[in-house]
Image (cartoon, coloured by chain):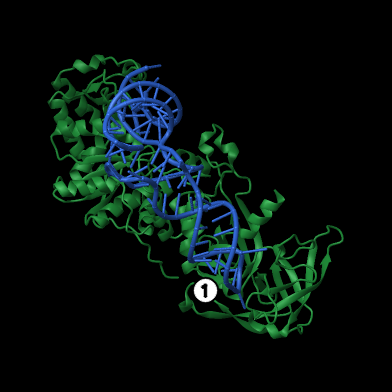
Chain colours: A green, B blue
Amino acid sequence: MSPTPVDESKASNFIRERVAEDNRTGRFGGQVITRFPPEPNGYLHIGHAKSICLNFGLARDFGGRCHLRFDDTNPTKEEQEYVDAIMADVRWLGFDWGEHLHHASDYFEQLYAWAVQLIESGKAYVDDSPPEQMRELRGTLTEPGRESPSRRRSIAENLDLFARMRAGEFLDGSRTLRAKIDMAAPNINLRDPVMYRIRKTSHQRTGDAWCIYPMYDWAHGESDSLEGITHSICTLEYEDHRPLYDWYLDALGIYHPQQIEFARLNLSHTVMSKRKLLQLVQEGVVSGWDDPRMPTIAGLRRRGYTPEAIRDFCDRIGVAKADNMVELALLEHCVREDLNRRALRRMAVLRPLKLVVENWPAGHVEEVEAVNNPEDPSAGTRRVPFSRELWIEQDDFREDPPKKYFRLSLGAEVRLRYAYIVRCTDFKKDPATGEVVEVRGTYDPATRGGEAIGRKIRGTIHWVSAAHAAPAEVRLYDTLFVKPKPDDEDAWKTLLNPSSLETVRGWAEPSLASAAPGSRYQFERLGYFSTDPRDSRAGAPVFNRTVGLRDTWAKIERAETG
RNA sequence: UGGGGCGUGGCCAAGCGGCAAGGCGCGGGACUUUGGAUCCCGUAUUCGGAGGUUCGAAUCCUCCCGCCCCAACCA
């Protein structure tokens, strides 16, 4: 299955316009250098994909570059596992940071020197306030804050104390380094923000070299500056931080990138906050960060999504500043569109019902020719064995067929895809349960290949030869949550969908027995499926349903049932 | 009630004073050996509301309403 070329000529958005404008005026010398700055405290999700596509896409389209920078300033939450997963995910999405893999922790020494510089110029001070006192003095949204007694400490004393903070002389939380800005500022971020806190925790990269760690605001803009970033793109909640971003850079007198904010993605029927996703993982609601029901890149990959589909989705949702909630239907549309063009067709029966072709000689086997992909003639054809006993889908037989039901029912004719037209002559029920357990019929030898001679056959169903079929485990996924906006409710976990995973045992075409890991197929009339990269084995394939096919019949039936 | 943002059809989203793009969804039809795909057609006399400026406003001005974010030694 070869990648479908995706038209990535991006629709414009306000960020691209600003970048283009900066190029026009020569503001950054015509350069465009962006960065994707994840904190390694969780796996990347579809919302991050939006940011990745934006940042790497901008760099690509403007002939610049995009850095991957880990915002690893808080060792208590960050782990190497996440670092590895993030790099794998960005690469899988199709982006390359080249030589530009960076870490905020690469800059700890420089950041320290700059902090000393701010202390020397009277713009930072060591504060002895414990956390509760600091909160107390910060004021509220409507009342100004008050200055800490430490604020009027001498430069010499600040220098000494700060050096001793670094040296590990003080307890965690006992002191901080703060920027001296304005305790009465209406923007709370400017009320003497903390630059460093003491954390005697080893860091996944710097080990025990440091016991003071910079805060996000103090590290981010400075890292951007060091790397020569031109446009520092982040989400809306940082809009209030921009004055601080600017203040630090100006106070230092160093190169000054432009921060631009856009609205993060919200997707229906799922949650996107790392905190909630982590909770689902830790509480075992899902099997892990890569559970196919998760909105993570790893989950979507395991589910069978393609990078092309995700990139296409990110292009289609646009970039703006209005809060949004994108319907899952759009994401699903994007995978279907991609997979429709690329996935090989196969037949598989998920809920098997035996069909016996009474006039077909027992033991006789014929091979019929089936098209691999009607959207792509170069995919060729294959031969599929046909015999007397077949598996068909339970849904494809009805004892009491509703109006417009084109499938099998007593006396009705249906086409077995690529094989023959059969007429249903009988069926058997389990006397105990009333369940239909076998359907019988006769085939018309003149219709080989499925040719409808002299009549119109409205229904075509898929099948698999019972004697040749490969057993397969198939995992059918539904949305993780039953409501489109689980975040709206306080008790979001009560909205978990109890049927988000249903595992069935079905039968597949013989060739599927040894389907390669990660391969994707369309099971005709059912949907797109891919082998589970963890659990699938040769001879015992496990398929994940990526997404179902559009199901017009289900829609009609639903409408008529009410 | 302080500050920062945002409000265009069910969901996204163009629009940048000249009289509402596009996509998804939805509805209808054509075609069909996947009730798939594809192809047509339809889907905002109106842009949160009210005033005002203008020959002319979603686009400019005023006021109002609604929603989101900020009071971690998180990012």
Residue A167 seen in the figure: no
Q: Residues within 10 Å of mark 1 (few under 14, many from 20)?
A: some
- Judge by depth and name the residue closer to the eye, A226 or A329: A329
Residue pictured at 18% horizontal, 22% vertical: A158
User: Residue A99's spot in the image, x, y percent?
Assistant: 23, 56
Badge 1 marks a residue whose secondary structure is loop
Q: Position of residue A109 (x, y in %)?
A: 20, 39
Which chain's residue wears label 1? A
* Residue A469 position (above or below residue B58): below
Label 1 sits on residue: A374
How many numbered discs?
Answer: 1
| Residue A308 in view in this figure | yes
Q: Is residue A374 above or below residue A43?
A: below
Instruction: Tell me what residue is drawn at x 46 percent, y 78 percent.
Output: A378
Foreground: A370 or A102?
Answer: A370
Place of residue A512 in the rendered image (x, y in percent of width and height, measured from the top left):
57, 72
Q: Considering only vertical position in the picture, is A426 above or below A39? A: below
Amino acid type assigned to the residue bearing label 1 in the image? Pro
Quick one: quadrant of the N terminus of chain A? bottom left
Residue A66 lies left or right of residue A514; in this view the side is left
Asked which quadrant contains residue B59, the reply is top left
